[in-house]
């Protein structure tokens, strides 16, 4: 099986990651594109915080990809019916794995979504949670939710390409019914073969009990659900990743603050219901027009809230970016904050101080971070 022998018609994408020392780029993604009847391979080359794009025609691709791939240790190739993964160890040994699945994928800019976790996988807890039928078909009313958790796992997968530990511990704050928790655990343990431990926190005792019962029923020994108030959870030990999916209002802030306090390396947070600033904002400046209309004020306040969160994380030593989590038509709560700890915390940005004064109200994560690190 030659991983570089690409079948254009079934090809979805290729990801070259874990660069070797002589590589110019951190990562390269390759996708098939059909434009004006031309069949092309579109390359996205990541270098630092910049992305460079180029197109290769089919005739030039085979020779070029053979050269390019030599600069990376990991190669993922996704087709409509399978996923091939090549990994080079520290000693130079190359291993090759292949996962076969059913699906339909079109090679165009508007192609149907190719889920990383296919309908039909025997993720048994999702039957109990009403996402799958008993024969593992997707329940139509849960299609948006399934799209969201697939996208979440897909984003985490990209980051884990550089994760070099055999075990991972994850906190899921505001886990709710835990669709994401169960499917992420399945992906990590069954597909990536990583020993995973996930701790889910939620306020509702009945929800937590139900999730623990499901985990025990199917032998998911690495999952534990706890009744806990995010705002009161202090010290956690040896945690690699924090996730939140629609933790409401300031619950997101307490979760992010927990990541900062405990030096958690990876953060993936999809906020929800950012009411705090919307209810208290009072702009006395030339920007007051932004708060004159309820709908505009609400959206502006949500974007402002997440902008402040991102800046606090940056000051706390994280590389931060914001992704469109899913299309707006599937959920208006469609932004994800993705952060990775890269340096020691200790900075409080003066521009952020100025902004907080300008809007006439504080913001919970900003307040927590300032009190923790600068004594209020």
Image (cartoon, rainbow, N blue to C red):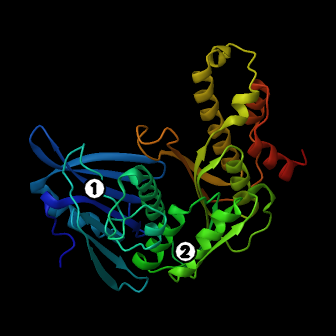
Quadrant of residue 28 in the image? bottom left
Compute the Cα span from label 2 to label 1.
39 Å
Whether pointer 2 and pointer 1 mark residues with C-beta atoms closer than 8 Å, the reply is no
Element at label 2: helix
Residue pictured at 42% horizontal, 60% vertical: 154
Q: Position of residue 264 (x, y in %)?
A: 67, 64
Residue named by callout 2: 214
- For the residue pair 350 and 190, the one nearer the viewer reads as 190
Q: Position of residue 262 (x, y in %)?
A: 74, 64
Which of the numbered marks, if any, corresponds to residue 184?
A: none
Residue named by callout 1: 30
Would residue 93 appear left or right of 34 to someone viewing this image? right
Residue pictured at 67% horizontal, 59% vertical: 343
Element at label 1: strand
Please tell me whether residue 187 is drawn above or below residue 221 in the rendered image: above
Q: Earlier in the sequence, mark 2 or mark 1?
A: 1
Q: Position of residue 233 (x, y in %)?
A: 78, 62
Residue pictured at 42% horizontal, 76% vertical: 192
Q: Which is more foreground, mark 2 or mark 1?
A: 2
């Amino acid at each position: 099986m030659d991983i570089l022998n690409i079948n254009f018609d079934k090809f979805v994408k290729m990801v070259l990651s874990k660069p070797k020392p002589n590589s110019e780029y951190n990562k390269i993604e390759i996708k098939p594109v059909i434009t004006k009847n031309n069949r092309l391979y579109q390359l996205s080359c990541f270098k630092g915080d910049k992305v460079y794009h180029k197109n290769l025609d089919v005739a030039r691709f085979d020779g070029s990809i053979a050269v390019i791939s030599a600069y990376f240790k990991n190669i993922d190739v996704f087709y409509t019916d399978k996923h091939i993964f090549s990994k080079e160890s520290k000693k130079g040994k190359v291993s090759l794995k292949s996962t076969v699945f059913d699906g339909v994928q079109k090679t165009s800019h508007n192609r149907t979504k190719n889920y990383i976790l296919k309908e039909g996988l025997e993720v048994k807890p999702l039957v109990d949670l009403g996402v799958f039928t008993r024969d593992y078909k997707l329940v139509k009313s849960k299609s948006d939710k399934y799209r969201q958790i697939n996208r979440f796992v897909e984003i985490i997968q990209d980051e884990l390409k550089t994760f070099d530990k055999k075990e991972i511990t994850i906190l899921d704050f505001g886990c709710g019914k835990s669709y994401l928790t169960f499917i992420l655990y399945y992906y990590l343990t069954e597909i990536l073969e990583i020993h995973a431990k996930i701790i889910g926190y939620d306020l509702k005792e009945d929800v937590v009990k139900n999730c623990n019962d499901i985990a025990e029923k199917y032998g998911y020994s690495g999952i534990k659900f706890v009744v806990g108030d995010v705002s009161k959870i202090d010290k956690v030990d040896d945690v690699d990743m924090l996730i939140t999916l629609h933790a409401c209002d300031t619950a997101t802030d307490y979760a992010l603050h927990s990541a900062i306090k405990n030096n958690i390396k990876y953060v993936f947070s999809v906020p929800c219901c950012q009411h705090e600033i919307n209810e208290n904002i009072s702009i006395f400046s030339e920007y007051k027009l932004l708060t004159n209309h309820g709908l505009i004020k609400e959206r502006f306040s949500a974007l402002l809230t997440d902008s402040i969160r991102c800046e606090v994380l940056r000051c706390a030593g994280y590389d931060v970016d914001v992704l469109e989590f899913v299309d707006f038509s599937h959920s208006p709560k469609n932004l994800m904050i993705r952060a990775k700890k890269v340096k020691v915390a200790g900075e409080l940005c003066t521009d952020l101080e100025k902004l907080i004064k300008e809007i006439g109200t504080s913001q919970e994560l900003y307040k927590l971070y300032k009190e923790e690190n600068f004594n209020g």
